[in-house]
Amino acid sequence: MQQYGAAAYQSTAKTVESPREREAALLIKSAATLQSVRDNWPPDSEVLKGALTFNRKLWTIFMTSVTREDNALPAVVRQNIANLGIYILNETREILLDPVAPNRLDTLININRQLAQGLRAN
C-alpha cells in the first residue's frame, strides 16, 4: 500500500510542478551526481561518463530551448544561457578526455547549483 501512495504522490508532484521547478530539480540532480563523483574520486570511468553525459544532455535541452524563436525570455538572457551552455559542453568534453583532477567538476557543479537557486527564487 505504501508503494501505491508514493507512486500517487510522484504522479501528482509532476503535474503540479512548474517547468522552472522541474528545471531546478534536474539541475540539482545533476549537481548532486557530479558532486558524488567528485567526493568518490577517482571515479569509475563509466560513473564519470554517466554523470557528465546526463549534465550534457540537460544543457543541450536548455540550449535548444533558449534558441527557439518562440522562447519568451529576453534576448540577452537567452544569449547568456546559450553561452553558458557552450562553455559547459566544452568543459564536459575536456574532462572526459582528461579526467585528471576532481576539482575540474567544481565549475559544473557550481553553475548548476546557482542556476537552480535562481530558478527557485523567481
Image (cartoon, rainbow, N blue to C red):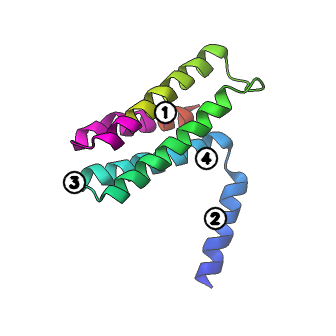
**Quadrant of the frame with the C terminus:** top right
Q: Where is residue 9 shown, x and y percent of the image?
A: 65, 67
First in sequence, mark 1 or 4: give its number: 4
The Cα atoms of the two marked residues, 1 and 4, are separated by 12 Å
Q: Within 10 Å of the Cα at label 3, are there few (<14), some (14-19), or many (20+) other Cα atoms? A: few
Expressed as whole percent of the image width and height from the top left, the position of residue 41 reads: 22, 53
Comes first in the chain, label 1 or label 3 = 3
In the rendered view of the protein, which quadrant contains the N terminus?
A: bottom right
Q: Disc 2 or disc 3, which is closer to the eye?
A: 3
**Residue 85 in magenta?**
no
Q: Quote the CA–CA distance across marks 1 and 2.
A: 24 Å
Residue under label 3: 42
Task: Give the amino acid at mark 4.
Answer: Arg
Q: Are the residues flagged by discs 1 and 3 in contact, CB closer than 8 Å?
A: no
Say which element carries label 4.
Answer: helix
Residue at 68% x, 22% y: name it: 73
Q: Earlier in the sequence, mark 2 or mark 3?
A: 2
Residue at x 69%, y 64% (from the top left corner): 11
Q: Residues within 10 Å of mark 1 (few under 14, many from 20)?
A: some
Q: Position of residue 88 (x, y in %)?
A: 44, 32
- In the image, 107: left or right of 76? left
Find disc 4 in the rendering and name its residue. 22
Task: State which tag comes first along the sequence, 2 or 4.
Answer: 2
The residue segment tinted magenta is: 93-115
**Residue that mark 2 sits on:** 10
